Image: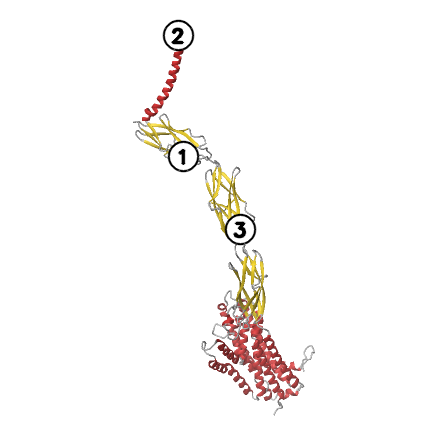
């Protein structure tokens, strides 16, 4: 009984002492690392707790200090880093796993740690271990919830101009996913609009390849149709992969252009006129702009003593793309000499004007020609009279 | 009367014309005149061809009528062709007609011809028609020579309008020479001595070509005010007066007409106001307009020619032609 009790006690003691011995030895080991071997090698980094956002890269500068009088060959490893975080340990330009430190000297190593985009908010602890000597506990605080998406954005999504303007938007396409993605670029512009994507000032592209966590600058040029009416137009553009889609809503404000064309229905810009006579020239005024033209007045620049009367003298309004007929009555000077004269007809609105140069050929009146013929006939008649009177003698 | 191969009766009038033409072309007078014409024609043709490359500039209006430059251009050493015609034309006309009637009369052949069964007016008509045929043939040959040599040297044939203008120039030259021919026939009817007739014609020719121009200049100096000293309208009306006076000269009429016909860019012969020139484009006139522009001159030339003929016809028909 007594021996059993003793035996039990002993066993308990053994257990106790064993546990104590284990705990002691563990403590002793900790002590040696802190006190015993700590005298030998020390790890040091200034920023032991860092707050970052997802996708950021942290560069730790770690100093390995040898306090002993002998050279220490230390194995270095990072422990406890989450699996999808990548890290590299470098010194002197190399990836290292061990480092040798001379007595009473220190070496520097850097730990590069990339925090992934898809990461939860919270505290992440890990340690850098100098094999058998010491450890350096480090803490990373991820300050916000990580994302896993594509970002397509522009600083200026609204441009204004006339319909002839080329609208240029500068957009950024950020691949915030873990993989390289091939984005198809497309737009849902209204019919007639031309949307072109350009990457790195290259030619027009239909798709773009973006590495993870990289940004691609995309230039989007938009050309409005010629006859587009004034107003605001929305042009959604998309960058699409198989898994993600990012959209951007561009908006273009067309102010409307003012242009017109003065011509004739046939396009013929020359005419004939008799000196002192009148001639009607049919004209066509066409609104080639995208805004309605109002109060169109017609004027002329003619040779001296010529006149041009327009009917109607004024056009109230012409819608975009529409035409209006005008008749110009040109009256030539009586003193005009035979040959070509230049006459400029101009249609003017407050916004724009159009002028057309006409070449008008002046023809002399046939009146004096006939009088000359009559004089010659009279002379010939007198000869005929003489023939009749004196001939056949 | 003569019969030809086809046994067709030739009208006696044409027999006389035929005889007159053969007399003309076989005479030394005509050979010398033709030689003179060919020389002057060759000379002016040479100067105009050697000068052609300098005159014709690319991309100027009216280049399709560059062929006319052969008739009007010159490098300054010799006058151009149409000026030569204006100068020598009267000489040809005078020399072909100044002894038409009086030499027959002095040679006592007139009464012999009249003894034939022909009308009296056939004689003067035949003289006129025969000389006209000779002149026409000569000028036609000269103009065709210019066209031919011009085509040969430049390699470009004349355009249709250029050809029409050359034809009009030819007709004008014939009418102009016909005027002097009729004038000399008139004097040959009027004066019994051929020398008197010839001298009178030459005197009129020299008067118009030298002295009349001096008189016109004197009148111009007297009546045309200095620019700026009088209103423009007054200067223009005075200028028009001077032009009107100088157009009594048949030579002036001819040179006005030929210049306008051969230089299509001439748009007016009188003084031009600034108002008329403003807005005018430098372009050649169409042929019809050029002709209409010089129609008064052409009318004057033709009418003067016809009137000269009418007077000489009447004088000849009413006179006593029996030999003394």
Name the residue nearer the viewer: B279 or B67. Answer: B279
Q: In the image shown, does B89 or A106 lie closer to the viewer?
A: A106
In the depicted structure, whether residue A118 falls above or below residue B145: above
Q: Outermost residue, bottom direction?
A: B324
Tag 3 residue: A231
Residue marked by disc 2: A2
Position of the N terminus of chain A, as image quadrant, is: top left
For disc 1, the marked residue is A51
Residue B234: percent from the left, percent from the top? Answer: 49, 78
Q: Which mark is residue A348?
A: none
Question: Extreme right residue here?
Answer: B7
Hey, which quadrant is residue B287 in on the image?
bottom right
* Comparing labels 3 and 1, the label whose residue is closer to the camera: 3
Disc nearer the start of the sequence (3/1)? 1
In the picture, measured across the screen, residue A136 lies left or right of residue A165, that is: left
Residue B67 appears at what percent x and percent y?
54, 69
Of helix, strand and loop, which one carries label 2?
Answer: helix
Task: Name the spot of residue A111 as percent of width and height, x first.
Answer: 39, 33
């Amino acid at each position: 009984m007594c021996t059993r009790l003793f035996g039990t006690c002993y066993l308990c003691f053994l257990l106790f002492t064993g546990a104590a011995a284990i705990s002691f030895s563990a403590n002793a080991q900790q002590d040696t690392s802190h006190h015993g071997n700590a005298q030998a090698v020390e790890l040091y980094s200034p920023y032991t707790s860092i707050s970052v956002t997802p996708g950021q890269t942290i560069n730790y500068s770690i100093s390995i200090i040898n306090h002993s009088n002998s050279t220490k060959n230390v194995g270095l490893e990072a422990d406890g880093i989450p699996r999808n975080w990548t890290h590299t340990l470098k010194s002197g330009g190399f990836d290292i796993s061990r480092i040798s430190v001379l007595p009473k000297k220190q070496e520097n190593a850097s730990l590069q740690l990339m925090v992934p985009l898809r990461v939860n908010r919270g505290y992440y602890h890990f340690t850098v271990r100098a094999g058998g000597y010491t450890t350096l506990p480090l803490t990373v605080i991820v300050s916000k919830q990580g994302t896993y998406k594509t970002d397509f954005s522009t600083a200026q999504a609204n441009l204004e101009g006339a319909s002839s303007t080329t609208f240029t938007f500068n957009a950024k396409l950020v691949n915030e996913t873990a993989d390289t993605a091939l984005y198809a670029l497309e737009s849902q512009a209204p019919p007639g609009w031309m949307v072109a994507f350009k990457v790195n000032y290259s030619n027009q592209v239909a798709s773009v390849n973006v590495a993870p966590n990289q940004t691609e600058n995309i230039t989007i040029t938009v050309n409005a149709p010629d006859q587009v009416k004034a107003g605001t137009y929305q042009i959604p553009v998309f960058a699409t992969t198989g898994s993600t889609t990012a959209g951007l809503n561009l908006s273009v404000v067309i102010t409307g252009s003012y242009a017109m064309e003065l011509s004739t229905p046939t396009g013929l810009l020359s005419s004939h006129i008799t000196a002192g006579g009148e001639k009607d020239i049919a004209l066509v005024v066409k609104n080639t702009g995208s805004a309605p033209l109002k109060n169109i007045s017609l004027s002329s620049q003619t040779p001296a003593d010529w006149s041009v009367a327009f009917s109607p003298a004024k056009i109230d309004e012409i819608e975009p793309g529409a035409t209006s007929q005008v008749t110009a009555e040109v009256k030539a000077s009586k003193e005009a000499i035979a040959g070509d004269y230049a006459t400029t007809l101009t249609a003017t609105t407050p916004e724009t004007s159009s002028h057309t140069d006409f070449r008008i050929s002046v023809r002399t009146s046939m009146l004096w020609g006939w009088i000359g013929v009559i004089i010659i006939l009279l002379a010939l008649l007198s000869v005929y009279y003489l023939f009749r009177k004196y001939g056949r003698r | 009367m003569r019969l030809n191969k086809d046994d067709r009766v030739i009208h006696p009038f044409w027999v006389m014309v035929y005889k007159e033409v053969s007399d003309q072309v076989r005479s030394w007078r005509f050979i010398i005149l033709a030689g003179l014409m060919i020389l002057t024609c060759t000379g002016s043709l040479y100067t105009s061809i050697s000068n052609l490359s300098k005159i014709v500039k690319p991309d100027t209006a009216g280049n399709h009528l560059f062929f006319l430059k052969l008739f009007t251009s010159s490098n300054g050493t010799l006058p151009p062709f149409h000026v030569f015609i204006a100068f020598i034309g009267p000489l040809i006309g005078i020399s072909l007609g100044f002894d038409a009637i009086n030499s027959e009369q002095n040679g006592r052949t007139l009464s012999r011809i009249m003894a034939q069964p022909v009308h009296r007016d056939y004689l003067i008509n035949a003289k006129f028609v025969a000389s006209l045929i000779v002149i026409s043939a000569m000028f036609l040959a000269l103009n065709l020579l210019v066209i031919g040599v011009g085509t040969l040297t430049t390699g470009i044939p004349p355009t249709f309008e250029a050809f029409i203008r050359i034809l009009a120039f030819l007709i004008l030259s014939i009418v102009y020479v016909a005027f002097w021919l009729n004038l000399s026939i008139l004097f040959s009817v009027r004066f019994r001595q051929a020398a008197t007739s010839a001298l009178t014609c030459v005197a009129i020719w020299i008067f118009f070509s030298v002295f009349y121009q001096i008189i016109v200049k004197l009148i111009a100096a007297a009546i045309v005010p200095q620019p700026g000293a009088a209103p423009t309208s007054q200067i223009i009306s005075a200028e028009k007066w001077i032009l009107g006076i100088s157009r009594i000269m048949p030579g002036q009429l001819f040179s006005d007409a030929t210049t306008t016909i051969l230089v299509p860019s001439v748009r007016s012969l009188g003084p031009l106001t600034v108002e008329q020139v403003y807005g005018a484009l430098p372009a050649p006139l169409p042929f019809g307009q050029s002709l209409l522009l010089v129609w008064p001159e052409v009318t004057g030339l033709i009418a003067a020619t016809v009137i000269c003929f009418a007077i000489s016809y009447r004088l000849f028909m009413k006179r006593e032609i029996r030999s003394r």
